[in-house]
Image: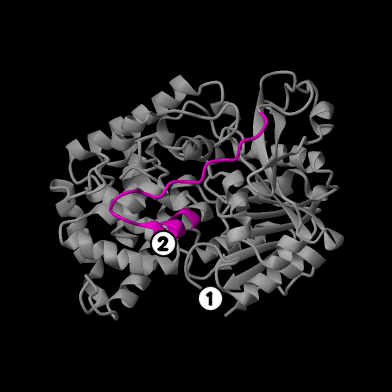
Amino acid sequence: MPRNYSRLGAAAAVVIAVLVSACTAGSPATSQPAPTASSAPAGPPPVSIAGYYAQRLSWQPCDKGFECARLYVPFDYSRPAGPRFSLPVVKLPAADPASRVGALVINPGGPGGSGVEYALGARSGEFTQEVLNRFDIVGFDPRGVGGSLPAVRCMTGPQLDTYFAVNGDPANAAQLATVVSESKLYAAECARNAAALLPYMGTVNAAKDMDVLRAALGENALTYLGKSYGTYLGASYAQQFPTKVRALVLDGAVDPKASGLQLDVTQAAGFESAFGQFAAWCTGQQGCPLGNSASGAVAKVAGLLSAATAHPLTNLLGDGQPANGAMLQTGIAAALYARPEWPLLKSALSGAFGGDGTILVELADSLLERNPNGTYSNLADAELSVDCVDRAWPRTVSAFAAAAAAAAKAAPLFGASDVWGSLPCAYWPVQPDALNIRAAGAPPILVVGDLHDPATPYRWAVNLSRDLASGVLLGWNGEGHTSYFQGSSCVDSTVDSYLISLHVPRSGTVCP
């Protein structure tokens, strides 16, 4: 399956968690719609950098206690009088105004995840009450993402259906040719439909937008919580604006120095490890479809995926999606984001081994943000638009083939498909624009890593904490993607203390 599902970030775990309670054979879970906000910021569009920084947000009530606004940012900061984005911003005011510290800007990951949707979950299990009391929770959709005007749109729903259903572990020349042709098509459609936006979609610019947002919020320095890809956004901000940092929590770190293919190979190994943990748990449960021993679980599931590639399973959703190997694999990956989803994965695999792939397709649809009517959010388009410019990528199929072979050895279930999922970047029409991350001059920055994170391995948190001149590492011996508010009171209290009081833990501390 040509898809980097492992890049989707903490937002994916939120969507899948909803599916645990809502999953039926009838209707896949979909992402929460963004709140209605004014179509444009107050006042005329700025034409200078000073004008952008002078903006003040015109808050309007929305979504039962939230407030909504929009913010202008330029496509190109070297040409501020040129085209501009209008970004949606949502705020949940601090519950205890008397003890308010300030605004906490948040990003759920992706790249391509909606910060607006992430903020809308603030009252339902994303933040501790202490943080909700002390901070305005502020989410925004980055440039080109979600409710951004304009937003990146490349592929139609039917085109994405075809793309996601392609076998990402090609076993012969014909299958590889399909992966290549679909990857070329994706890049070409982005060039055709979003050419004006693509040069400006990188994280370097998104971090600049976040500083404009900081100023519009009236904050002298930024307080920020970024998860998964959001850690790279936060680190990029610190690199460009080190003296404007108050407190940054970078949870589920992405390694800023790794190449794109290095990220793919390492992430695939992370998902493989998470599947091993799931298999060890499942085989100890009654009725586990993997049998009584975890040692043969990979081979058994690989056989299921191979058989479904040749002969798709039943899909009772009736949405036209094939329950083939690519879709089943994506559904498995979706459920590995968090341990609470393991019982659902056990049930989904039981159905699949019995010929019914419905639940796994439903999981895949939710992860990919496919709606019941066959349309998609722009998550996939935005993700590629950022990924392909944030890091260097080779331009030859042979380089991807070598990386896929190496990844398949380390991660037989997920390795090859994770690498081939980045192949559109080989044909991308825009050159990479990346930063060397050091952030010299910034105050202490807290980097948090889960020792068993499937999507962002702990070593990346170690690397990022070392790359940052003032990085402080906090670990958690847990399972699942990201650590804050995922079940560890130790992590939660340490992060809260840092955010509220700027108390910095001893670097290298590992919460049990």
Q: Would you call the spot at circle 1 few (<14 residues within 10 Å), some (14-19), or many (20 or more)?
A: some
Q: Which residue is mark 1?
A: 477
Mark 2 secondary-structure assignment = helix
Q: Nearer the viewer, mark 1 or mark 2?
A: 2
Is the magenta region chiefly helix, strand or loop? Answer: loop
Is residue 469 toward the left or the right of residue 277 in the image?
right
Q: Which mark is residue 21?
A: 2
Circle 1 SS class: loop
Residue 437 in view here = no
The mark that comes first in sequence, 1 or 2, is: 2
Q: Nearer the viewer, residue 49 or 129?
A: 129
Q: Is residue 333 above or below residue 493?
A: above
User: From the image, which quarter does the N terminus lie in?
Assistant: top left
Q: In the rendered view, does 467 fall on the left or right side of 96?
A: left
Which residues fall within the magenta stretch? 14-38
Vertical relation: 245 (above or below) 290: above
Which residue is at the far front?
A: 64
Question: 99 or 141: which is nearer to us?
Answer: 99
Q: Residues within 10 Å of mark 2 (few under 14, many from 20)?
A: few
Q: Quadrant of residue 464?
A: bottom right
